[in-house]
Amino acid sequence: MNKTRSAPDIWLLVSIVSLLAIGIVMVYSSGAVLAFRQYGDSYYFVKRQLFFAGLGLVAMYFTMNLDYWVWKKYARIGLLVCFFLLIIVLIPGVGVVRGGARSWLGISSFGIQPSEFMKLGMILFLSKWLSSESSQIHLFTKGLLPPLGIIGLAFGMIMLQPDLGTGTVMLGASLLIVFTAGARLSHLSMLALTGAAGFAGLILAAPYRLKRITAFLDPWSDPLGAGYQIIQSLYAIGPGGLAGLGLGMSRQKYSYVPEPQTDFIFSILAEELGFIGGLIVIMLFLMLVWRGMRVAMTVPDKFGSLLAVGIVGMVAVQVVINIGVVIGLMPVTGITLPLISYGGSSLTLMLTALGILLNLSRYAR
């Protein structure tokens, strides 16, 4: 394997830093009103975002300069640690409940989300496992079922919190790795039908999820309940027009769009910066995905290729779901927009993962 290292992909780096900078500006613009009402400090959210962005950039610099095959050595241990964190977060008195889900570990307002760690831990483990010569992924029983069992176990533990959004992103990125590793499309199609039935069961098992589905199909059937978020998001996007109302001029952030600095930050961005601003953000994400997939196709070994696919898949799945929800094409799932939305562990882990992708780009042919 060629281990000659060059500079990281400049376009990939530019897209990451640009999205992060836009995110910091929009976290302040979208969250200043809510921050002042809740904490008496308009800068509360943006100060914390700057802290975690700085922490994430340090982590990204470290992983960008750490040779990626080191992760292969610690992938199994990392996955075990992630499973341990998923277990202890479910213990009453240990795990912290926020937004109706017991998915946090921490003290007061500072905490980590073990499910975020699992997304990266699963990507590293699957890349190591499926890149080995002993992998028989084209065989259903011996090759495909074992990794799917690990993925299913992790997804099930995340659903116990419950956190359907993060579980869906982890599942999507993992299945993309499995497909890229050589799994037969016929096997995956058969499992997809089974998974769809199981997914329907999860929705029917929780009344609030069923309400989200019906609200997605017709938000006006319950405009003050399950359909409220989608309606208010569309009320934000519509007036934005081509160039927007102007930075800081959103009306919907005044207690209309719930948590405007997290899940629905793109709707505030579209209201203030318009179609042009939204298009710029989408183009930056497309650049990130394009350069990331180029890395996956040109990195010199299978482990690196699968690792790049997983990281890019994690970003792409999250972006598609978040923007799909905001513009009313998907049910509300509670997924943040990578690098843009306010977040602590999610932002830090995302920048750490993108640092690995940048390191992979240093070895791409």
Image: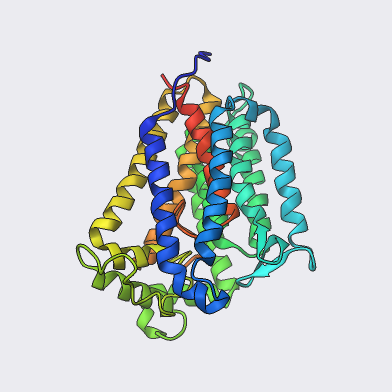
Q: Residue at x 44, y 63 (%)?
A: 28
Q: Residue at x 57, y 27 (%)?
A: 68
Direction from residue 119 to residue 321 in the image, left or right: left
Q: In which quarter of the image is the C terminus?
A: top left
Seen in the picture, residue 9 relative to 310 is either above or below; the reply is above
Q: Can residue 260 be seen in this view?
A: no
- Total residue callouts: 0
Residue 77 image position (x, y, % from top left): 73, 36
Q: Classify residue 253 by image quadrant.
A: bottom left
Q: Classify residue 10 by image quadrant.
A: top left
Residue 127 image position (x, y, % from top left): 58, 33
Residue 222 image position (x, y, % from top left): 42, 85
Colour mode? rainbow
Q: Which residue is drawn at 56% across and 56% down?
A: 166
Seen in the picture, residue 79 relative to 222 is either above or below; the reply is above
Direction from residue 363 to residue 92 in the image, left or right: right
Q: Is residue 224 visible?
A: yes
Q: Which is more toward the observer, 190 or 328?
A: 328
Residue 319 image position (x, y, % from top left): 42, 53
Q: Which is more toward the observer, 274 or 245?
A: 245
Q: Classify residue 198 by image quadrant.
A: bottom right
Seen in the picture, residue 148 relative to 299 is either above or below; the reply is below
Direction from residue 325 to residue 65 in the image, left or right: right
Direction from residue 87 to residue 31 in the image, left or right: left
Q: Which is more toward the observer, 220 or 233?
A: 233
